Image (tube, helix red, strand yellow):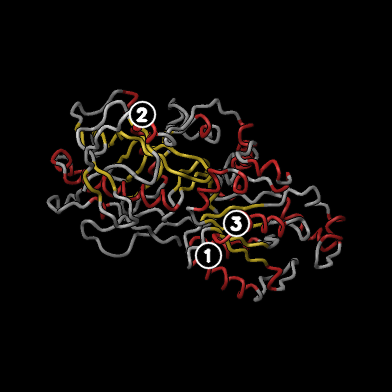
Amino acid sequence: MRIGRLPPCRRRASARPPRRGYEIAAGGPGTEPRPLRSAPAAPGGAALAMNRGVTRKSHTFLPKIFRKMSTQSSKERPENLQFPFLDDDTTMSTVKESKTLFIIRGLPGSGKSTLAQAIQDQYKDACKVISADTYKITPAIRSSIPEDYSKLDEDLVDYCKRDISVVVVDDTHHERERLDQLFDIADKYQYKVLFVEPKTPWKMDCLQLKDKNQWKLSVEDLKKMKPSLEKDFLPLYYGWFLSKKSSENLRKTGKAFLDELGSLKVFKKESKYFLPAEDPKVKLDLTSYFVKRPPSVLHCTTKFTDFGKAMGADEYAQQEVVKASYGKAFTLTISALFLTTKTAGARVELSEQELLLWPGDVDKILPTDNLPKGSRAHITLGCASGIEPVQTGIDLLEFVKLEKAGTKDDEIEEIGGGKLQYFGNGMWMLLLSKKIEVKAIFSGYYGKGKLVPTQGSNKRGSAFNPCTII
């Protein structure tokens, strides 16, 4: 099994191709990698034409770019309905190949249903809208969540089981307990969450909302709900969340890398770092070794905010670039795959645009470290037993420090996907000869975020399966 490229994702070619290559054939999960065959040279400019659309244009990116929309429809749409997921072509196509739960939040009469309808109109058959109004659930301050939500949740779960790409829940969502119920459903069915609030000028004006809400709520009723909706609801962490298709393909690429690396003589000579001291002759299967896996929606974390409790959380969330980028699609570049005795991951090469969202205090292990901004950017593919995902970023920083010091084995082996480097102590990195581009949405993760070991077969060749979040 050999590492190669991701056909559904765009990629960049380096100046020096590998001596031999392998690709993962298109066809969905479970498809085995296959050898690449040499293609005849295209006549005339055909080769150039074939590569059009896979090259990312170079721009001088400024924060204001996030306020620009890419389609004519944004100019025609009212300003209070201008969002990346409604107007930006790249974002809309990425949402369509993902599973997204839109949680529309706001006071009664603020324009939530109009926003929900706009999402429905944009995504059509790929979208299902669930409104609390339909279930006659009156918005109010309550001591507990009413049983009236059971039917709503039943319908929500039904849509999630059917893998509907876009599911919209239209409600006030002013209660943390209710939101936790939705986060649990999103985790269980592997949906990423997007919080959306109306942009109407009167969204917090209780005097105007008194006349606009259909429940005939008084100003006093509205004022009771207002405090919980005035403050932004911060996630456990912010980051780029890969589309379902990109997640599946990157996961397969990671598995192929582990399989090929594990079969190499040069790796077997150094496999002592991965084997138990009491039984050093046991057969090593790297796919089984990294027993803890992230959920099916892979991600690249930018800022750990701990629901607003982490240092610098509010400052990060209030940045204009963070607000403008929320819910917007990006194309991340994977430049390398790596593994240590603790973690396996993909190295993300951030563009100037993406670096605007990167915190300035995360690219160091020791206070004295001075590494380039974005050095820690990664996607976790697996962790050894007893290791938490946060270790992946720490491991990558160790690689960067060794690179900076010029510390790596003189022997570099070329394999199917690029050049293999060994840094000693069980630290391996594959520099991809063709960088991989994956689609992702910048958002937040709002669930509990606990990973558990994958249950099932440990035989060689088993899929790089997702774990369950609890």
What residue do we see at 36% from left, 41% from top?
346
- Judged from the image, the secondary structure of the residue bearing numbered disc 3 is strand
Do tag 3 and tag 2 residues touch (Cβ < 8 Å)? no
Q: In the rendered structure, which disc, 1 or 3, sits on the residue that comes first in sequence?
A: 3
Tell me if I can see residue 423 in this picture.
no
Left or right side of 113 for 372 = left
Q: Position of residue 457 (x, y in %)?
A: 26, 63
Tell me if I can see residue 186 in this picture.
yes
Q: Which residue is mark 2?
A: 45
Kind of residue at badge 1: Ile
As measured in the structure, the alpha-carbon distance from the residue carrying label 2 to the one carrying label 1 is 51 Å
- Judged from the image, the secondary structure of the residue bearing numbered disc 2 is loop
The nearer-to-camera label among 2 and 1 is 2
Name the quadrant containing residue 53.
top left
Left or right side of 462 for 217 = right
Q: Position of residue 287 (x, y in %)?
A: 26, 52
Q: Position of residue 56 (x, y in %)?
A: 46, 32
Q: Which residue is mark 3?
A: 102
What residue do we see at 18% from left, 44% from top?
271
As measured in the structure, the alpha-carbon distance from the residue carrying label 1 to the one carrying label 3 is 13 Å
* In front of the other: 301 or 163: 163
Q: Residues within 10 Å of mark 3 (few under 14, many from 20)?
A: many
Name the quadrant containing residue 385.
bottom left
- Judged from the image, the secondary structure of the residue bearing numbered disc 1 is helix
Q: Which residue is mark 1?
A: 185
The nearer-to-camera label among 3 and 2 is 2
Kind of residue at badge 2: Gly
Q: Which mark is residue 29?
A: none
Q: Residues within 10 Å of mark 2 (few under 14, many from 20)?
A: few
Q: Position of residue 28 (x, y in %)?
A: 35, 56
Q: In the rendered structure, which disc, 3 or 2, sits on the residue that comes first in sequence?
A: 2
The nearer-to-camera label among 1 and 3 is 3
